Image: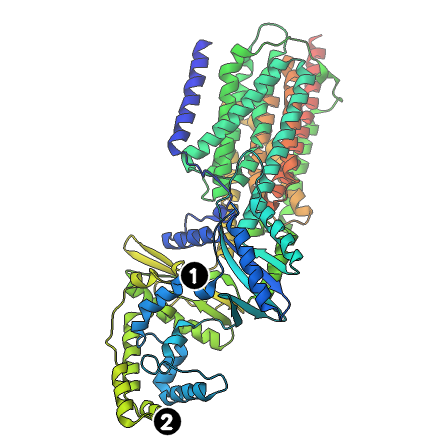
Amino acid sequence: MKGRIAVWFAVAAAFALAAALRYQPDWLQTDILALTGDSEAAPAVARAQQKLNDQLQRNLLWMLVSPPGDSARLARATAALAEKLQVSAAIENLEYRWAEDERFRNEWALLFPLRQQLLAPGDRELLATAPEQLVQRQLAAIYGPQGGAPDLQRDPFAVFRHYFTAGPRVSTRVYRNIPVQLGGEREFTLIQATAAPAQLGGRVHTPLLQLRAEMQDWAETQRLQLLVVGAPLHTEYAAAGAQREIRLIGGLSIAAICLLSLLVFRSVRPLMLSLFAIGCGIAAGTAGVIALLGQMHILAFVFGTTVTGLAIDYAFHFICNRLRPGDAKDGDILPGLLLGLLSSCLAFFTLALTPFPLLQQMGFFVGFGLLGAWLTVLLLFPALLRLRQRPLDFASRLPQGKKRWYGTALCALLLLGLAALPRIQFADDLQLFYQPPQFLAEEEQKLNGLLPSRAESSYFLVQGRDWKQLLQREWQLAERLRAFQREGELQYFQALSEKFPPLEVQREDWALMQGFYGSAPVEGFYKQLGYSESEAEMLIGELAQPFRALTLEEWLAVAGQNYRDLWLGCEGGSCASIVRLYGLGSDLEFTGDLEGIVLVNPTAAISEVMSRQRDLLLALLPLVMLIAFGVIAVRTGARRALSVIGLPLAAVAAALASVVLAGAAVNLFHVAALLLIFGIGVDYAVFSHLSGEREKSYTLLAIAMAGVTTLLGFGLLALSATPAIADFGLTLAVGTSLTLALATLFFTGAKVKGQNRKGVDR
């Protein structure tokens, strides 16, 4: 006995050490998009998506809205709101005084000496085709009703000002350096904030949602409307919901286990040992995921709480076997425990072999959790379990049945599954992970209605061997996108090359400006303004500036954060950047003929990844069944193994039929549930078929208790607000109910066989 305990401590120490070596403070994730990783994606695409995910998970946009006509009061209220946000621990930093940003001054100071080689697209086209129109435009601006004094010595035709302020046009007034914008019949100001990292602790934390509610109450007292959007709000809402579900599902499962244990075993010791086995299972599952993957998503933890309903199976079977009168015969239960572990772990670790993060984490968590619980039962229970034995014979009181009923039920369920196959439909998308609450969705819709446009989820990924080649390729893409703009299919796009063109384009622009300054229209411009010929020649001569080759790194040092976020950096001999799209009218017909440029659609990519994983699991399911059949056949023989494997196979077929006949589209999580139903069914079938005549009542008791606790664990998942978890839980609840019913039906048929044998003996 001491040797078994020593082995248990050695295994526990190994799990703890492996987890400690990979442990990191942020091992528990809340980012929904982290679940959609695709290991088959190109590294640059993966880096791009990860960087965008990191940005999304921290960015918040606060919009303060008022009726038109009170811009000054709105600006003052915005400053007051910013002060309130700055003192909140939920906000790290924010920007709102956009008109007096030091960054703009630094960027202007760096780029203004390069003003003759940096042109807005419209000015570049005019210089190349009709330079005299540029002169007429400036004259009209000077003599117009809102005319102002141009910088005749340095930027007489405002080409650098046009370049510097290029972008979406909105009606804006500035008060106290705060831009007040007009959207429809409403005025609004914007505060862009970065949220503090989400804190997941012992209680549910919703600091951003609480801050949002408090600030909206304050805005109402100011007769203003406050709209807040951003991924951190959704992350916090989803994480809080997941934490609540963990408490509900885990708490009710533990409560059911406690009640059942006390009622059946009439002792606290079996209950404490069962809870200890569950705790060891959860600890082993968590340690296994951290050791192999380094992190786990909170949704995977919610899925993993179902390990309580499975880990307790081993404890119940061992304890019920100890109820039998006479000397303890733990060896009688060992074959069933071993086959049950092998079959269940086979199903769960199959999930871990897929490249889909949630399935990997869930597979490792439950697989290692079951292993930890199994080792605890096998190594510690023989020495620690003390139980009053008592005879049980309720198996003989089951309704009398016939052996063929079990086979008939299996065939009927299998036929039901086959009949449902022609009606099967598939669907996989991101909404399975999370559906936003109505109050956040409505708020985002209102804000989008006021803003000119927001960035689309689709974007272009541009790659090059260095930053120079990257800008060249971006420039080729920009020419295509400008054509889409002219056709009305795209409102706006944001690219590094729009603000910092390739050096070749800058040289061409510089040459255009030099030629333009020496042209007759420019000389006529100064004469029309009243300058003498000599004065005009002197001013034109002073305009000439030498070309200067600025590096991308120098510009990025002073560029706005929105442009710095587009740069992904260089790694492994390749540089990458993102081109953002705004106001996309329809899907762009991008043929992909531009080298180094890929159109990335994360939503479509997520659906594609999930569909691939669904198809992979469907292909793995027959393989798992075949392997399980082989393992069982080695112990029982092929004929009996068919009867054993028929139970989980029938349950899987009927569970799939229930999904199809209910009109639901089959998704990745339905298929994952089918795989786990098979593992659970094999467990119940193995114990049913390997149970001896004197063990039937004790085996049936253990199966019934395991079935009830598993149903509670999985069934409660069906109540989850996350569609993926709900689909998973409901399918598992149906399948587990069927496996429990079939196992009971098998015992009714087996009983007749036993009675007939006794009658013959007489």
How many neighbours does mark 1 have within 10 angstroms: few (below 14), some (14-19), or many (20 or more)?
Answer: few
Within the image, what quadrant is residue 563 found in?
A: bottom left
Q: Amino acid at mark 1?
A: Asn
Place of residue 576 in the rendered image (x, y in percent of width and height, measured from the top left): 35, 58
Q: Which mark is residue 722?
A: none
Place of residue 154 in the rendered image (x, y in percent of width and height, measured from the top left): 32, 79
How many neighbours does mark 2 have within 10 angstroms: few (below 14), some (14-19), or many (20 or more)?
Answer: few
Work out whether residue 273 can be spotted. yes
Query: Helix or strand or loop: what does disc 1 sit on?
Result: helix
**Front-lying residue, 15 or 323:** 15
Which quarter of the image is occupied by the C terminus? top right
Earlier in the chain: of badge 2 and badge 1, it is: 2
Q: What is the CA distance from the residue labelled 2 to the residue labelled 1?
A: 41 Å
Q: Answer with left or right where residue 673 lies relative to residue 141.
A: right
Work out whether residue 637 can be spotted. no
Q: Amino acid at mark 2?
A: Gln
**Front-lying residue, 732 or 134:** 134
User: Could you tell me which residue is drawn at 39 percent across and 52 percent down?
Assistant: 47
Query: Helix or strand or loop: what does disc 2 sit on?
Result: helix
**Front-lying residue, 748 or 161:** 161
User: Could you tell me which residue is drawn at 58 percent across and 40 percent down?
Assistant: 242
Badge 1 is on which residue?
Answer: 562
Q: Which mark is residue 528?
A: 2
User: Could you tell me which residue is drawn at 45 percent across and 31 percent down?
Assistant: 288
Place of residue 695 in the rendered image (x, y in percent of width and height, measured from the top left): 63, 14
Given the current orientation, which residue lies at the most extreme left position?
546
User: Could you tell me which residue is drawn at 31 percent across and 70 percent down?
Assistant: 502
Question: In the figure, 293 relative to 149: above or below?
Answer: above
